[in-house]
Image: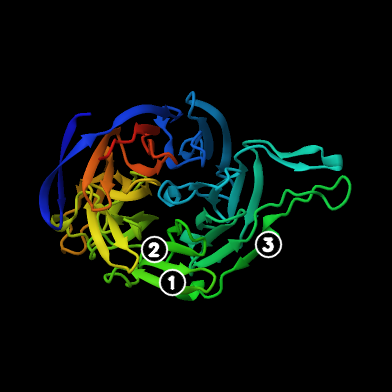
Amino acid sequence: MADLTLAQSGQEGTKVAHAVKLKEVHQFVQKDGEKPERFLSVKFSPNGKRLYATSLAPQARKVYLRAWNLDDRTLAWQQTIATEDKENPILDPDSCLKLFQVDVSPDGSYVLVNDWGRVQLWAGKKLVSKGWHDKEVVIHREGELAFELTVEVPATNERHIGWVSAARFLQSDGIQLLAAFGRPPTLRHWRQVSSLTLPPRPGFMNELDAKHESQTAAGFSGLLKENAVTCLAPHPTDSHLVGCGGGSGIWIWNWKTAKVERLLGPDYGKTRPWFVRIDVRPWVWVYDLEGTFSSGELCWVSAHGDESAPFAPSGRIVARITGVSVHNLPWQSEGFVAIWNHEGKKLHRCVHQGAVVGVACAKTAPWLVSGEFRKQVKLVEIDETPGPRERPVTLEYLDLPSYIYVWNLDGKLLALGEGHQAGITDVAIAPSDDLIASCGIDGTVRLWEAPKLK
């Protein structure tokens, strides 16, 4: 693999990083008519034999969940998981960036997707129970919808009506999951998703509906107050400790006691309004969070995008914005990855060329992968109306080629992958750490050979 030189600019000034170029081994391509689908999330199965991904087809107004076999790179199954209708009137690419995120249960039984007002659980494999005389009874075949966990989301504003903002499985015995939703945020915990056991009477299959085994964690709304939840991160080993990212910072809390155990970063804690004008001071948003270990010590890795820099994932034209200082306008999206120790001290800051909305950590080695979402602003029109604060401005957001980055936990850039022609929305690492997957709004899911790190 050849060396690749990339200029990076950040707070420390401009510096040049030399990194190994990643080898792309395969790509899955999906189109929505003549245009590409916009992939939202990607995840490996626990055994590494399947790859799951969600995507939005803007023209068809549908969202898909797909599973590919990694042995022969064929499509195993595909399901439509959302369609624009009266119950789901908006499938906006900006709003969907953190919706329809995929996760897989520790045993591979269920594939989870967060949605408007619900959490979907699809069968990741054939789910069976025992019927009369111990005869095997198929409850759900692979790729079938197993459960819809409906939640009542507080409709406090238009942007968050029905939004389940994050959902993840807990890494524990049995199948448990957490979901966060609403503003002010609420945390919902399902103790057990299903129980496939010997029936208590002949001919009866004992299948437990998860919505009857749910509870709301007390104190969670007061913990984050008015700040939305953008991601959940189960502790790598302890199912009781979960991380949460939001505009006000990164909180590590014990969901059983609803007490904060860590607050990452001294520069957080400000209230961030939903609609931010372009000329205001920078706001750093947390898009993803993962826990890992470095030299036996727990640390956290977070993905950030600067919301003061123009960042519209849909690439739509934003017309006639007033009060913009054109000369001071940041012309490209900005972001970084932060590495923290468990005491909340920031250890390293990994600078990217665009916003970072996805990060993943290797299981057996101290390295991580991140994907950037590069956007650029083009000034289309300016009305020379008198008054510096009253000039209407029309801006267009342009997609740029984006890269995936491999870093060690000391913040050193080790490898870089080229190929995505537009923003990268998620990354994942295979359980054996030999493959990296990335997906983006260019309609591709790409597989990369993980670098041989010394």
Label disc, if present, on residue 213 of the rendered structure: 3
- Give above or below for 99 relative to 222: above
Q: Position of residue 267 (x, y in %)?
A: 26, 70
**Amino acid type of the residue that numbered disc 2 sits on in the rendered structure:** Gly
Please indicate whether residue 110 sits to the left or right of residue 329 in the image.
Answer: right
Q: Residue visible at 36% across and 55% down?
A: 293
Q: Position of residue 425 (x, y in %)?
A: 37, 44
Label disc, if present, on residue 224 of the rendered structure: 1
**Amino acid type of the residue that numbered disc 1 sits on in the rendered structure:** Leu
**Amino acid type of the residue that numbered disc 3 sits on in the rendered structure:** Glu
Q: Position of residue 155 (x, y in %)?
A: 54, 65
Q: Report crowding for label 3: few under 14, some 14 to 19, many 20 or more residues within 10 A (C-alpha).
A: few
> Of the residues tagged 3 and 1, which is closer to the observer?
3
Residue marked by disc 2: 246
| Between 301 and 86, the one nearer to me in the picture | 301
The answer to which of marks 3 and 1 sits earlier in the sequence is 3
Label disc, if present, on residue 358 of the rendered structure: none
> Of the residues tagged 2 and 3, which is closer to the observer?
3
Please indicate whether residue 23 sits to the left or right of residue 50 in the image.
Answer: left
Residue 289 visible in the picture: no
SS for dot 1: helix
Q: Residue visible at 86% across and 40% down?
A: 133
- Give above or below for 440 relative to 25: below
Q: Disc 2 versus disc 1: distance between alpha carbons? A: 9 Å
| Between 417 and 279, the one nearer to me in the picture | 417
Q: CB atoms at circles 2 and 1 under 8 Å apart?
A: yes
Residue 297 visible in the picture: yes
Q: CB atoms at circles 2 and 3 under 8 Å apart?
A: no
Q: How many marks?
A: 3
SS for dot 2: strand
Please indicate whether residue 204 sits to the left or right of residue 338 in the image.
Answer: right
